[in-house]
């Protein structure tokens, strides 16, 4: 599915996507958050980009852990700790690996979801990034179990992620800054679920 060189390519591409969608992600955050999700994500991945030359030739686990630590230290708000924890735990799941297959990827995603659940003390149906992460992981697992190709499984995950992000418009947030606005948040898509969907979209397009 992907070796360490491909993972570096994906991380770079995610950074470019965060920069490209910075204004939209920040716009999503304005009614329900601190109006900074896009700015924070773009800044965090710009810092990650600066670390990538030193990660050439490193194993996938080391790459992902470094991404996670960088996001924790550079991304403000809740997104830094949540995404940082997800990447760090994913890196631990793939420690020492030079390549990963679909089973490795699904195991890594399981670990990332658990990290977000534990760090955010959240679950699905609370208008968070988990509302995109959890259904996308299920869709990918189901597709893999049906014998679908890696590309098909990832594309199924992307569709489920975007459907989940869209679904957050119908949910009343109970976690994070969005919980402060209560039912006034209805009709607004969660920016974290959206940025995750962009990430998975990038991955699906490159493997």
Image (cartoon, rainbow, N blue to C red):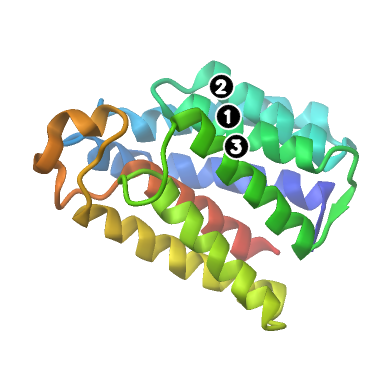
Left or right of 131: which side holds 114? Answer: right
Query: For mark 3, does the 10 Å Cα neighbourhood hold few (<14), some (14 to 19), or many (20 or more) residues?
Result: many
The reply to whether discs 2 and 3 touch (Cβ–Cβ < 8 Å) is no
Label annotation for residue 86: 3
Disc 2/disc 3 C-alpha distance (Å)? 10 Å
Task: Locate residue 114 relative to residue 104 in the image: left or right.
Answer: left
> Can you identify the residue that label 2 sits on?
72
* Residue at x 66%, y 62% (from the top left corner): 206
Name the spot of residue 185 as percent of width and height, x first. 15, 42
Cα distance in 3D space between marks 1 and 2: 5 Å
Q: Secondary structure at mark 1?
A: helix
- Quarter-wise, where is residue 70 in the image? top right
Q: Quadrant of residue 100?
A: bottom right
Name the residue rendered at 44%, 48% in the picture: 130
| Cβ–Cβ under 8 Å for marks 3 and 1 | yes
The N terminus - image quarter: bottom right
Identify the residue at the far left of this view: 184
Q: Are marks 1 and 2 in contact (CB under 8 Å)?
A: yes
Please say whether residue 45 is visible from this viewpoint: no
**Measuring 80% from the left and 38% from the top, which residue is drawn there?**
61
What count of labels does the image hold?
3
- Judged left or right of residue 124, residue 155 is right
Give the percent coordinates (x, y) of residue 126: 31, 45
């Amino acid at each position: 599915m992907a070796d360490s060189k491909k993972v570096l390519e994906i991380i770079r591409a995610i950074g470019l996507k965060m920069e490209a969608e910075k204004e939209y992600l920040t716009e999503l955050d304005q009614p329900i958050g601190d109006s900074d999700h896009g700015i924070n994500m773009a800044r965090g991945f710009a810092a990650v980009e600066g670390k990538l030359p030193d990660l050439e030739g490193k194993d996938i686990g080391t790459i992902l852990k470094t991404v996670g630590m960088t996001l924790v230290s550079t991304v403000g708000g809740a997104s830094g700790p949540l995404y940082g924890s997800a990447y760090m735990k994913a890196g631990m799941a793939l420690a020492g690996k030079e390549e990963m297959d679909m089973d490795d990827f699904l195991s890594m995603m399981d670990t990332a979801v658990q990290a977000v659940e534990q760090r955010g003390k959240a679950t699905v149906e609370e208008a968070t990034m988990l509302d995109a992460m959890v259904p996308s992981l299920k869709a990918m697992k189901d597709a893999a179990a049906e014998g679908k190709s890696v590309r098909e499984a990832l594309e199924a995950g992307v569709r489920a992620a975007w459907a989940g992000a869209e679904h957050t418009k119908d949910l009343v947030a109970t976690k994070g800054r969005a919980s402060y606005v209560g039912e006034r948040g209805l009709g607004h898509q969660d920016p974290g679920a959206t940025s995750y969907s962009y990430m998975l979209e990038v991955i699906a397009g490159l493997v």
